[in-house]
Amino acid sequence: MKNLYLIRHGKSDWNADYEKDQQRPLNTRGRLDAGKIGACLKRASVSPDRVLCSSAIRTRQTLEILKEEAGWRSEVFVENMLYLADPEDVLRLISRQPDKVETLVIVGHQPFTGQVASLFLGGRPIEVPTGCVIGMEFDALTWSDAVSEEGRLLMHLLPRRLG
């Protein structure tokens, strides 16, 4: 059994001082929402074996807050390709994960987060606002098998619904 959680970064600060889009940080709401999501993931006992995170500042900040709130001690790999990834790139990356990894978290961006979730969930559109978490379960024993299967939705967390 494999579990995959796709997490879109929290709301970013368009008014911050940054040169490149990749350097745009979270805003106050983004930090607060990441904390809410982290606490919710902790209550749900989500504990990844491995986390893949985009190299953008806002995704790394989101991840740091999630790790602190949820108490994660997972392996973390910053993946440059997740910054402007298309769904096929993400599927290839997932398929290459070691079989010993049972629970994988990917912290990234739209549109790939919603597109990959949609591919795994029968093609239906998935709402993916900032800070959203989509958790899926697969009967596969390997990640290379999981990417060719339809998953079962475990959770669809939206920060605005957490109060």
Image (spheres, rainbow, N blue to C red):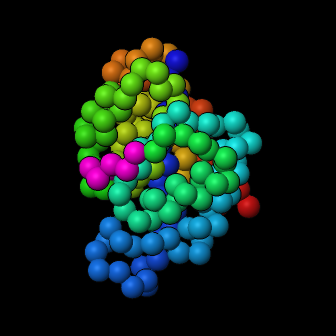
Nearer to the camera, 89 or 124: 89
Residue drawn at x 36%, y 72% is: 23
Q: In which quarter of the image is residue 146?
A: top left
For residue 53, side relative to residue 154 (left or right): left
- Does 98 appear above or below 83? above
Asked if the stretch drawn in magenta spans residue 79, the answer is yes
Would you identify the image quadrant in which residue 123 lies?
A: top left
User: Is residue 37 in view?
Assistant: no
| Residue at position x 26%, y 50% in the image | 81
Residue 139 visible? The answer is yes
In the image, is residue 5 above or below residue 13?
Answer: above
Residue drawn where x is 46% and y is 45% of the image: 76
Question: Seen in the image, is 122 located left or right of residue 11?
Answer: left
Q: Is 40 left or right of 148, judged from the image as shown?
A: right
Q: Nearer the viewer, residue 160 or 2?
A: 2
Residue 79 at x, y percent in the picture: 33, 48
Q: Residue 55 in the image: state x and y as whole percent.
A: 35, 57
Front residue (pair 108, 161): 108
| Total numbered labels placed on residues in the image | 0
Quadrant for the C terminus, please: bottom right
Q: Is residue 158 highlighted in magenta?
A: no
Between 142 and 127, the one lying in front of the other is 142
**Residue 157 locus on image (x, y percent):** 61, 48
Over which residues does the magenta segment extend?
Answer: 77-82
| Residue found at x 37% / y 50% | 78
